[in-house]
Amino acid sequence: MGTFYVTTPIYYVNAAPHLGHAYTTIAADVLARHHRQRAQDVFFLTGTDEHGEPVALAAEALGVTPKELADQNAERFTALAPRLDATNDFFIRTSDPRHVEAVQAVLARVKDNGYVYEGEYEGWYCPRCADFKSETEIADGNRCPIHEIELTREKETNWFFALSRFQEPLEQLYAEREDFVLPASRRNEALSFIRSGLRDVSLSRSTLTWGVPVPWDPEQVFYVWFDALLNYVTALQFAREGEDLTDHFWPASVHIIGKDILKFHTVYWPALLMAAGLPVPERVFVHGFLLGSDGRKMSKSLGNVLDPFEVMDRYGTDALRYYLLRDVAFGSDGSVSMEGVVSRFEGELANELGNLASRTIAMVLRYRDGAVPSCAVDPVISDAFASLPATVAERVDAVDLTGALDAIWELVRRLNRYVEETTPWVLAKDEARAGELDTALASLVAGVRTLSVLLHPWLPEATEKLRGALGTPSTGYTDAELVAGGVARVEKLAPLFPKTQ
Ligand code: MSP
């Protein structure tokens, strides 16, 4: 059966949930749902990153305490997951005392293992990234390349993590595990960062109080990135009351992250785990950035922002899930816009898939009183879906969520062409052609049934409705269940993609 553990990054609570957060959560949910379909024991984790300077600064600007701000915004993130139909098994908040304690225990072990020392650090620092920048990471005018704000010169005595000692082990890890980081271009980026020479990094901050106290030096708090990264292992200790899931689910099958946090997940994180004597994750998948309609970074002042809540209010959650993973190849950057949503919604969801499903069911109701003829799938189209479940599984295993969806959509289009080729409404007028009509109807039902299972991770609401009308609620992923489908009768189907506003 096997286990599958997938995570999203934990989101900063210094801002409200936006499209970037929705994107990562949706992608991780598609993986979680797909692996559950294949009868794997899945654990899906998301949550909020609540400590550190960015949160402390945002709270100060609002005149509230960091904890108050964290509580307020964590609630919005907790609510976002079900709104996206995300099926996370747990939601971790790093201000949870159980996380705090677990972080202290792991990092004390890293110190006991000899990878922590006291030292002085001076460098250029971006408070929004909560990160010191190396010479190659500084943009013109001494600015942060991500936030475009001026960097500050910081000097402090604190605890260091001996990252430099992991240069070789990391190079070896990358050499042994071709697919540790995907896509390949991101793997190369991580590897060249490692090869360019690793410097030790500060593990603690002395000028900040909003964080996890260093147990052997309570004047300092751990640098937020170490506290945050550790969520992926600490959550397993307390996610399920009275159980420790660590041995069962760790190492994670895949961490889904955006390209801006590559260095932390592909360099610091495996090094930290090695230092703590823990296994490294199986894979880190790095997705691109969703850009505004003009191809520029989304920003309110440019007016090029796509609001996920507006999309869901107008077209439903399925439409948002589908659009983001279909329109932008998962792993690459791409522009998104409301016009794009409308075009995919009308052209593909409502017309191609919605009509195919409603026509198929309506024809079985009209010509066969709802009883699905029990005959074999027409060999003309059986090829189009016999191997599809395996193709989809293969692509999802490679985290190619767009490629998997593309393959499924070929079947949607093939079935629509099949309707035009067979013209069941013509066959229905000729008693002598009843056998042909039976084959056409049975084949269409089998095809639609396959779609109702394969598309479940991307379109959980529509496919549930569809499986209801087919009388086959199971999402189980075996050829027997998919192709034969066991559909005996169909029921009237309500529109799959109604416009909600
Ligand atoms: N708190 C850290 C992650 C710690 S994980 C141990 C963080 N949080 S974040 O809230 O700023 O970002 C979370 C995720 O949202 C990142 O994966 C980031 O790449 C993603 N996105 C933010 N804006 C985005 C787009 N415009 N497009 C796609 N994803 C982007 O980083």
Image (spheres, rainbow, N blue to C red):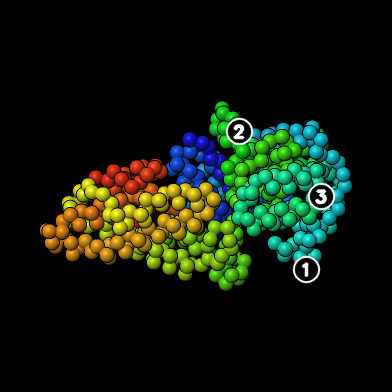
Give the answer, above or below, for where 400 lies relative to 342: above
Q: Is residue 370 left or right of residue 455?
A: left
In terms of sequence position, does the residue under pointer 1 or pointer 3 come before the other?
1
CB of mark 2 near ligand 1 (< 8 Å): no
Of 320 and 411, nearer the camera is: 411
Looking at this rendering, what residue extends furthest in the left direction?
A: 431
Q: Is residue 130 left or right of residue 477?
A: right
- Tag 3: Cα neighbours inside 10 Å, few (<14), some, or many (≥20)? some
Q: CA distance from mark 1 to mark 2?
A: 45 Å
Task: Name the residue located 67 percent from the left edge and 45 percent from the top edge.
Answer: 176
Residue contact at pointers 1 and 2, CB within 8 angstroms = no
- Tag 2: Cα neighbours inside 10 Å, few (<14), some, or many (≥20)? some
In terms of sequence position, does the residue under pointer 1 or pointer 2 come before the other?
1
Could one spot residue 167 in this view of the protein? yes
Task: Name the residue located 54 percent from the left edge and 58 percent from the top edge.
Answer: 330
Indicate the position of residue 21 as horizontal and vertical percent values. Answer: 57, 54
Pointer 2 residue: 246
Pointer 3 residue: 199
Task: Name the residue located 38 percent from the left edge and 48 percent from the top edge.
Answer: 453
Pointer 1 residue: 140
Q: Amino acid at mark 2?
A: Thr
Q: Secondary structure at mark 1?
A: loop
In terms of sequence position, does the residue under pointer 3 or pointer 2 come before the other?
3
Q: Amino acid at mark 1?
A: Asp
Indicate the position of residue 117 as horizontal and vertical percent values. Answer: 84, 40
Could one spot residue 73 in this view of the protein? no
